[in-house]
Image: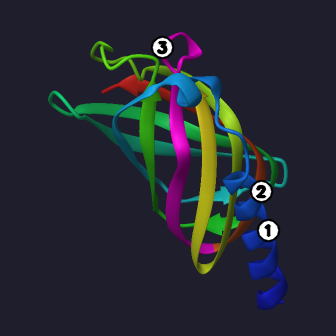
Amino acid sequence: MRKEFLATALMIASVFALTPQTQAAQSGVRIGVLTCHVRGAWGHLVASSRRMNCVYEPYHRRAERYIGTLSRYGVDVGRTNNGTLVWAVVAPTSNVGRTALEGSYGGLAANATIGVGAGANVLVGGLDRSIALQPLSVEGNSGLALAAGVGVMRLRAA
């Protein structure tokens, strides 16, 4: 069973790796890094929601703190413990104001966990849906779970 589970996880991750970049990422500027610590949760067959505490580290000013939720809609079964997500933040210009990451993001999401797991989330949103969290987030967590579907993330300044 572990081999089939791992093969499925690798297949899902490869699909995300080949997903075309968003318009913001194609014509944008990398402006910083967003790191979110996500609380563990049970997946429910068609949906899950996990709370997050995030730190955005722009390249040219002080860090900003955000709180939010990461929800998944699609196949989501099992339990994951606390995890960490890391994204490169891409915007149309390097001149974005404070709290520009506030808002809703949406895109594709997948993860697979047997003991230690990994996941990928490609999300677009924030300032007039012009901020991309690219190229892929790296999710490190532990537990026993499989999830694939649409990811929705909401952030607000802490």
Q: Residue furthest left?
A: 62
Q: Would you name the residue on which mark 3 appears?
A: 127
Residue drawn at x 59%, y 73% is 117
Q: Residues within 10 Å of mark 3 (few under 14, many from 20)?
A: some
Whole-Å distance between the Cαs marked 3 and 2?
Answer: 27 Å
Find residue 96 and report its horizontal and vertical position in percent. 33, 14
Q: Identify residue type, mark 1.
A: Met
Mark 1 or mark 3: whose residue is earlier in sequence: 1
In this orientation, which residue lies closer to the viewer: 43 or 31? Answer: 31
Q: Please, what is the dominant secondary structure of the magenta stretch? A: strand
Q: Secondary structure at mark 3?
A: helix
Q: Is residue 31 left or right of residue 103?
A: left
Q: Is residue 9 left or right of residue 69?
A: right
Q: Identify residue type, mark 3.
A: Leu
Q: Is residue 13 left or right of residue 45?
A: left
Q: Is residue 141 magenta?
A: yes
From what the image shows, is residue 110 above or below residue 150? below
Task: Residue 125: tell me if it is visible.
Answer: no
Q: Residues within 10 Å of mark 2 (few under 14, many from 20)?
A: few
Task: Residue 52: tell me if it is visible.
Answer: yes
Whole-Å distance between the Cαs marked 1 and 3?
Answer: 32 Å
Q: Would you name the residue on which mark 1 appears?
A: 11
In this orientation, which residue lies closer to the viewer: 107 or 89? Answer: 89
Which part of the image, by quadrant, shows the C terminus?
top left
Camera-near label (3 vs 2) is: 2
Find residue 142 and report its horizontal and vertical position in percent. 54, 73
Residue 78 picture quarter: bottom right
Q: Mark 1 near mark 2, Cβ–Cβ under 8 Å?
A: yes
Find residue 152 and report its horizontal and vertical position in percent. 65, 34
From what the image shows, is residue 88 above or below residue 10? above
The magenta-colored residue range is: 125-143
